[in-house]
Amino acid sequence: MADSKPLPSLDGDPVAAEAWLRDVFEIIVDEAIRKGTRASEKVCEWKEPEELKSLLDLELQSHGETQEKILERCRAVIHYSVKTGHPRFFNQLFSGLDPHALAGRIITESLNTSQYTYEIAPVFVLMEEEVLKKLRALVGWSSGDGVFCPGGSISNMYAMNLARYQRYPDCKQRGLRALPPLAIFTSKECHYSVNKGAAFLGLGTDSVRVVKADERGKMIPKDLERQISLAEAKGAVPFLVSATSGTTVLGAFDPLNAIADVCQRHGLWLHVDAAWGGSVLLSQTHRHLLDGIQRADSVAWNPHKLLGAGLQCSALLLQDTSNLLKRCHESQARYLFQQDKFYDVALDTGDKVVQCGRRVDCLKLWLLWKAQGRQGLEQRINRAFALSQYLVEEIKKREGFELVMEPEFVNVCFWFVPPSLRGKQESLDYSQRLSQVAPVLKERMVKAGSMMIGYQPHGAWGNFFRVIVVNPMLTHTDIDFLLDELERLGQDL
Amino acid sequence: MADSKPLPSLDGDPVAAEAWLRDVFEIIVDEAIRKGTRASEKVCEWKEPEELKSLLDLELQSHGETQEKILERCRAVIHYSVKTGHPRFFNQLFSGLDPHALAGRIITESLNTSQYTYEIAPVFVLMEEEVLKKLRALVGWSSGDGVFCPGGSISNMYAMNLARYQRYPDCKQRGLRALPPLAIFTSKECHYSVNKGAAFLGLGTDSVRVVKADERGKMIPKDLERQISLAEAKGAVPFLVSATSGTTVLGAFDPLNAIADVCQRHGLWLHVDAAWGGSVLLSQTHRHLLDGIQRADSVAWNPHKLLGAGLQCSALLLQDTSNLLKRCHESQARYLFQQDKFYDVALDTGDKVVQCGRRVDCLKLWLLWKAQGRQGLEQRINRAFALSQYLVEEIKKREGFELVMEPEFVNVCFWFVPPSLRGKQESLDYSQRLSQVAPVLKERMVKAGSMMIGYQPHGAWGNFFRVIVVNPMLTHTDIDFLLDELERLGQDL
């Protein structure tokens, strides 16, 4: 029989727990918020894996540790982690540390609830609906449906599953063997989640037909037509086109109106993977890049990227008003979605999803939006575009920098050509040698902790840098630093 | 051209941001941590949806708001949310607010990184491996693989996808149409995610063959044999058995050794959905409930439930050492998983999963474990069992309470029989009238804010309460209160 004494550690001692959590919060403020966003501090503290393992003393033991020891551990974890909120973090499609969004995330963690029923998440059920409604309005829909998913890849999978269910409702019960072979169309510049999703959903990667893109990375609608004909000729049934608004590497926007025309002609579901580019809809100046998105059947949009809401915040938006989302995914578990509840059970949205427990992902965006307003968010987007353009202009002015192309978004792609390769464009091994530059510079910048920029080969091109201009705290100084630092790191190459 | 002036709001003013975040933290301490875990405060503050919408002023506007206004909003969001850390929250398979796990969650949010590469998550790539290794060791495996997934449903889907890929690697490329019809076996007491997963993965819910369970909710291995023969006779290929360790409603543990024998005989993948019951492996006293789990091919285990790590923390564990997880899911995106990095790219575990960005779910459990030690966690599990037993004994002592069955886990299922129904077991409408009691009491307790307990019908049984004893702060007083409060709320029925 248990007695009613509290357990060791902080269990059952709320005063001590509060005091200890305040200490943790001070460490977070010091290490993650203050140092973590200050340009004069390192963006990362590189350690080789074996050394880091030993510094962190990762192994889990039988005995618990003192509160002081745990505080030290908190500090070490932050110290050796990459500071993604730092103004020199250009490595991913997210960067920055917005205090309002962070507040939303911390409150979410403190409340620790699941989004499935009004019963245990009354505030967040209503809030999610409001946030989704607002995102849908920006797409151009006055009604519809939607849900927050754990990341854009899963949002894209949801769209695939909905598209096939809409055409073949039998599939839910009888599976794909009851269906003809299906075909999905997407451009060669699409995100890899389309392939992963096709495999996971049992369609197989062969069902993904790759449509050509132009030299800027945009899907070519004529080739889409051609691929549809080719697929049909081989006996496959086209059912879905996945267009991209903001490709991962080049930041390209597919021509949605032309693609929507093709979809309309062939009766295909149009999904727009706007995980990266969706937030551009907030900008009156730049939203033309997504012209036609209102003709989509579904849109994936990750406010954790360009809007900085924090990982993860990924909305799947639907034009559908026929409850397709619920019909496709529901299984009516009686222990959770009882029909004899004392409130309107239509508020229990948990059966719309394939998860059971689902994290609250709306509060961080809601608080951020309340604080900034639509106008503040728009200003951020416009500012990111303008700073990207500043980076482009500076690249053009400097020797040893070569743009891959003029960007239309905030992905700025370029080669740094070190002194020894300048003027050698004609030599046979130029491309190969140029491709070896970025990995070396990446190693140097990470080991110096001075900045982080991603690089990759792409198509026929060797490795080039992809700078993502997204952190709202960036200034011209940070952009200038980025270029100076590449010159400094690469001067002996 | 953007200038380099900071944006309005807190952007670019780190001192103001810090001060404001401290204010937020004080609100969290006051509302969520202090009041949210104090028995004398309400566990929930019920409002009808329309009233709540208006109280929260949910609508998102064009203009941003002042910092003071946002602080008020933070307070309101917490105030009207359900306090899942409260000692009177018995509603779900999680409850409680562990300070160390919460610290891990807040640090995770402050660092805001993604788990895909060593480059941007060095600490967490290593930490995840250590935590998974420890969980595998508790299963009984000295080697293996694994990953944290966004919830148990997705962990279960991963297992299904791995099982079919192992048997039919072609499926990834060619899809299910290239395969014979497949069959999954699980008991009628299994979690609904097995059905959802089969639909999502294109197998169809028809592929799920329901095996009978005994009166305690445990799968009957003989019926499993029978169902396998039946499926084969109909031309289906059995490939996976999903056993459950800790069913959702009754808390039943399937007989894993007997099921493993069947799987071995037929060459089937054995998945154990131990999302709820997995944490019992930490208890020397009770881990016999999962005897045989080491014979599984995969195990889903959610430390966010019984261990209180916080939503979400769901591990998929694999016995496999052949890199099956990666082979099944990889797509080798060159922009993220470059092969010419300056460190060992085997550390970039992101291609093991079907997501791209993936939240850090290991830190909260790691910190909790460091603080409590294996022994502290074991003590919590044992204590939950003991308190459940206390609840059972008290139920037996009181008039008007009827156990559904003697529990073997911390799900305590019972009917409250109100005064007007006592001694009326023989009347024809007894069951029907009894079934109407729980919804009424649920409404009353929620509107009073005094406690939250789940109820459900189950099989042939009408609505009964399911109390989950999991919050480590619970004492006998809380259990006594629960029963007294049911009596108080139901005295006029």
Image (spheres, coloured by chain):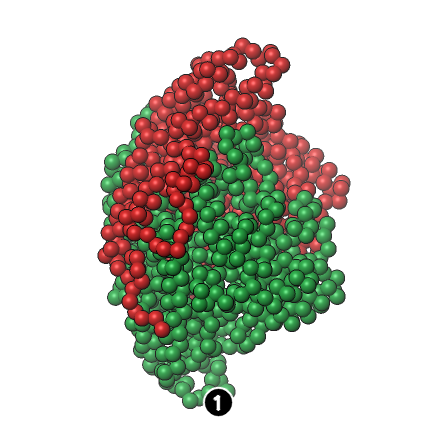
Chain colours: A green, B red
Q: Please give the name of the residue rendered at 56% of the width and 18% of the height, measured from the top-left corner.
A: B433
Tell me if A193 is positioned left or right of A375 in this view. right
Q: Which residue is mark 1?
A: A426
On screen, residue B486 above or below B370: above
Residue A4 percent across, percent down from the top left: 33, 25
Q: Please give the name of the residue rendered at 73% of the width and 64% of the height, measured from the top-left corner.
A: A232
Which quadrant is home to the N terminus of chain B? bottom left
Residue placed most toward the observer, B447 or B169? B447
Residue A493 percent across, percent down from the top left: 37, 81
On screen, residue B40 above or below A106: above
Mark yes or no: residue B316 visible: yes
Mark yes or no: residue B334 visible: no
Residue A183 percent across, percent down from the top left: 67, 60
Q: Please give the name of the residue rendered at 38% of the width and 42% of the height, measured from the top-left corner.
A: B56
- Residue type beneath disc 1: Glu
Tell me if B249 is positioned left or right of A390 in this view. right
Q: Chain of mark 1?
A: A
Assign a secondary structure to mark 1.
loop
